[in-house]
Image: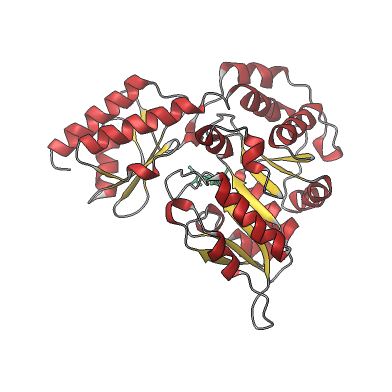
Amino acid sequence: MPVIDLRSDTVTHPTPAMRRAMAEAEVGDDVYGEDPTVNRLQALAAEMTGFEAGLFMPSGTMTNQVALAAHTQRGCEVIMSEGAHIYEYELGAMAVVSGLVPRLVPAPLGVPSAEDVAAAVHRSVHQAPTGLIALENTHNKAGGTVLPLASTRAIQAVAQREGLPLHLDGARVFNAATALGVPVAEVCQPCDSVALCLSKGLAAPVGSVLVGSGAFIAKAHRYRKLLGGGMRQAGGIAAAGIVALREMTTRLHEDHARARALAEGLVRLGVRVDLESVQTNMVYLTVPRAELLARRLAERGVLCHALGAESIRLVTHYQLRDEEITTALAIFAELLEEGV
Ligand code: TLP
């Protein structure tokens, strides 16, 4: 049975060009800063996003957590939007690793207002001082939604006024840039650091890059080592990341179009989907029995992510073609007709 895997864009396999680049990669000991391929990847990520320096890490979680550690002091609060990946899906690492407390602000469609962010800044002697503002673009839990440039800039103004650093969880920042129709550097520009992922929509097998100023990245380097992220001949995996940045960032509109087609098809079948939230490569459905539907779909070869009693997430990526979207919709139609 052919499998249509809509669980995440993390399920993608490396492209043939990535596999070739990995096999042929020049390598060295990255703990000594001597892996030429890692160095090229870090420089390329920094150049594309408009920062001075980059630091290669194994995962988006580690990249966010290293950024948080490097920006803050223990006992600080970090302002972030409700549903932020850093808060919801990183196992409380901010508290465990860096002694930080989250301060969540409302974020309809993943977009916090500058007013709410400003009101959440703490300065009183009775409260944990605010140490950082963290944004997420695209916002995973809100449906892969995009932060408008004006919102990011307005929050940057708050950060500057308050003397706070601004971090972006940009696991899917290239999806955001694609949806906004601007170079990725423009999306990143208001922020002091960005964690970008190579292994989501860009299809590399492993890896994320933290970008920021030279001084910030030097500090982050220490935390990466402290957390066990010192890698040796990592050029083998970094090579795939270079292909991801060079070849895979310009095709994301195809994933977005397929997510749109999937969402509209589901709406036609009577499924509840908030079409306003379908802005990139994710579709969230509200269904009466999410677990049951996910199980029945899996029996017919369609894999998805049940996120709660009534919520299912579908994600499009480069390994899907139009035919697979059509087949997935036909399987949904069968199951709905059967009353699942
Ligand atoms: N998200 C994964 C799961 O953890 C939910 C997914 O399938 O979407 N920031 C954002 C916005 C993310 O969506 C993710 C991964 C991360 C950070 C963490 O990246 P990894 O999984 O590489 O640690």
Residue 102 in view in this figure: yes
Q: In which quarter of the image is residue 189?
A: top right
Q: Which residue lies furthest to the bottom in this view?
A: 126
Q: In which quarter of the image is residue 174?
A: top right
Direction left: furthest residue: 338
Q: Is residue 328 above or below residue 225?
A: above
Which quadrant is the C terminus positioned in? top left
User: Relative to the observer, which residue lies in front, 94 or 130?
Assistant: 130
Eyeballing the image, is 306 above or below 202? below
Question: Which residue occupies 61% across, 34% down?
Answer: 198
Find residue 101 and report its horizontal and vertical position in percent.
Answer: 61, 68
Residue 188 picture quarter: top right
Work out whether residue 299 can be spotted.
no
Judged left or right of residue 227, residue 275 is left
**Total numbered badges shown on the rendered structure:** 0
**Quadrant in which the N terminus appears:** top left
Q: Which of 232 and 143 is in front in this view?
A: 143
Colour scheme employed for the rendering of this structure: secondary structure
- Please state the horizontal and vertical placement of residue 3, each as a whole percent of the image: 35, 27
Q: Image point 74% across, 21% down: which residue?
A: 25
What percent of the width, then of the height, locates residue 121? 62, 69
Q: Position of residue 272 (x, y in %)?
A: 25, 45
Of residues 257 and 69, the one drawn nearer to the viewer in this rendering: 257
For residue 203, side relative to residue 282 (left or right): right
